[in-house]
Amino acid sequence: MGWHLLRGWTVLVYLFMFLPIMVVVLLSFNASQFGSFPMTGVSFRWFVELAENEAILRAFRTSIVLGLLTSVISTTIGVLASLALVRYNVPARNAISTLLIAPILVPEVVLAVALLLFLNALSVNKSFALLLAGHVIFTLPFVILVVQARLVGIRRDVEEAAMSLGASPIQTFFQVTLPLLAPAVFAGMLFAFTISFDDITGTLFWKPGGVETVPTQIFAMLRNSISPEINALGTVMIFLTAGLPLAGIAIARRLALKRGG
Amino acid sequence: MGAVTLQNIVKRFGAFTAVHPMSLEIPEGAFVSLLGPSGCGKTTTLRMIAGLLDPSEGDIQINGRRINDVPIHKRNLGLVFQNYALFPHRTIAENVAFGLKFRGVDKAERDVRVKKALDLVQLPDVGDRYPKQLSGGQQQRIALARAIVIEPDVLLLDEPLSALDANLREDMRVELKRIQHQIGITTVFVTHDQAEALALSDRIVVMSNGRVEQVGAPEDVYTTPATEFVARFLGASNILPSICTGTDQTTVALDNSAFGKLVLPRERAPHVTGAGAVKLAVRAEKLSIVAPGAAGAVGEEEVSVPGVVETVDYQGLAARYFVRVGNEQLQAINMIDGSPFAEGAAVDVRLRPRDCTILAEAA
């Protein structure tokens, strides 16, 4: 009896979590011209229309470029910062570490306004570079957390062994440290990309006029009406932001297995 | 191959001095152990030779060339760590070939030398595997192969056997000695295990609190400890405060509360200059415990005193007795002939004065 209740409850929780997403995915294939039930038939017309909508395509390109740049810059800085903090005796190491992680703890709105006011005070105009800088700031903590955790687990004596065998510090980094760090670097890049791709709060504050990312584009479209196109866009976004990391994890796992764990 | 010379090297970490001025000559081809408890400065010394730490003062020379300012990757040293430190993302063959790539050895030559190194450590068929697929002992052999394949001037071993379990450790000890003899490489071996140091070394450097306590051949360090620390650290010793009552050309006369008057040959008391308080060291296995008035009469050179067994530590082949003699409690490790003495048994404790040593430091 108790087990049945528990089972039922579990199903309800899952429904609560996933039903809205399922509805969006389902309705994106709706033939009706309204973005809601009832379903009148299965059709790909909203995906086709999505693909022909210039504004959305532009937003998509912006988001992808922004996400990729954010992940590359954030990961590079994150790896270097982690190396410095873990491997070298940096003065005020804990303070710097806390400072780098802090953007996670500060509400995003506060961070967004702060950066904007700061740049206003410097009389710098909003630009794509500013948007990128903002995204790097709040994806950096995730990269640092992931990379630091892995770096602590890489024994110093493996690097010392490489150097004793004739590898310079730079050769040691590229031939030993980086390959061992690869899963964390990969995970950090994925994190940074999906966070950047998903973000709306900071982006709304920082984006220059005329530039839209996918989330801000959806937001703008919703102000008029709930178009079925948005459902199709939602489906694509779910695929990108959930499917991509899952695929990444699967690849990383397979790589790790090949090396014997 | 090379000789290593340390000239008054010092290592300080802030206000703490890890290694006090230390000088050491390691001749070419020698196997030298740095032996001591953790925190004695032995690993710090090894890391300075390796180039992983800079000495605060003093010079390090290899083959007469000062190498203080040569970075580790240009020193041509073989380094083996306690935890193997193999590259987990590379195969065994790639691990062993790693150092050769930085020496401009071409692919064909590399393969030949990797194979030779794997043969030397008796693991010829594991080249395609990854480190995780090998046991601890096998991984340590690969680490050794990786270190010697580059034909280093000096081989530095940092507690290489400590991570292995007891039986394997003894096998690896024999293996290590065989390999070192075969290639004749100058080796510096850091260990806290006296048995390893005694079995492997040509010379042992006993260290404590950042200072060298004694340097000598294993037998010298064991049978003639210079200081109380060495006497206690290597094996079990009894340290008896004694009074030197007189010396002549060939003998030294002593008096102590356990054995009364003893006359030692001069060479067992090289540090004694005249009358005064001294410390007498006697190894536990040099005291023999016999039944009172047992046969095999006390030899001319033997002293015998009565005692009472207080504790017996049975070890199978031998037993360690704690025996009360007068005001002193003495340790004696004796082979068991028949059955061991019981606790509370009255016994005779016999000692040959020439098995005693007078320590260098005053009492």
Image (cartoon, coloured by chain):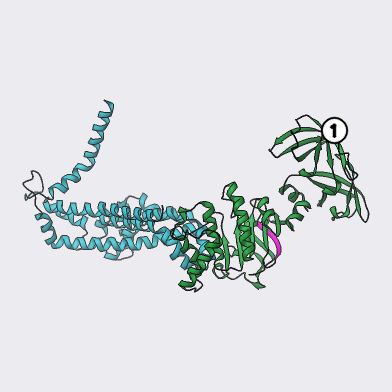
Chain colours: A cyan, B green
Q: How many numbered badges does the structure rendering display?
A: 1
What is the span of residues highlighted in magenta in the rendered image? B14-29
A243 or B2: nearer the viewer: B2
Helix, strand or loop for disc 1: loop
Which percent across, then down, holds residue B319? 72, 38
Residue at point 14% right, 54% down?
A: A221
Relative to the observer, which residue lies in front, B295 or B234? B295
Please state the horizontal and vertical placement of residue B93, each as a whole percent of the image: 47, 63
Instruction: Name the residue furthest top.
Output: A1
Residue beneath the point at 61% across and 58% down: B176
Q: From the viewer's perspective, is A151 left or right of A216?
A: right
Residue B198 belongs to the span the image colors magenta: no
Kindly identify the amino acid type of the residue bearing the numbered disc 1: Pro
Residue sitting at 73 percent across and 38 percent down? Answer: B320
Q: Pinpoint residue B52: horizontal percent, then vertical percent.
A: 57, 63
Identify the image quadrant of the N terminus of chain A. top left
The residue beneath circle 1 is: B292
A202 relative position to B104: left or right: left
Is residue A91 something that shows in the picture? no
Name the chief secondary structure element in magenta: strand
Report whether residue A220 is seen: yes
Q: Residues within 10 Å of mark 1 (few under 14, many from 20)?
A: some
Say whether residue B223 is left or right of residue B57.
right
Relative image position of residue A247 (x, y in whole percent): 28, 54
Q: Chain of mark 1?
A: B
Q: Camera-side residue: B306 or B19?
A: B306
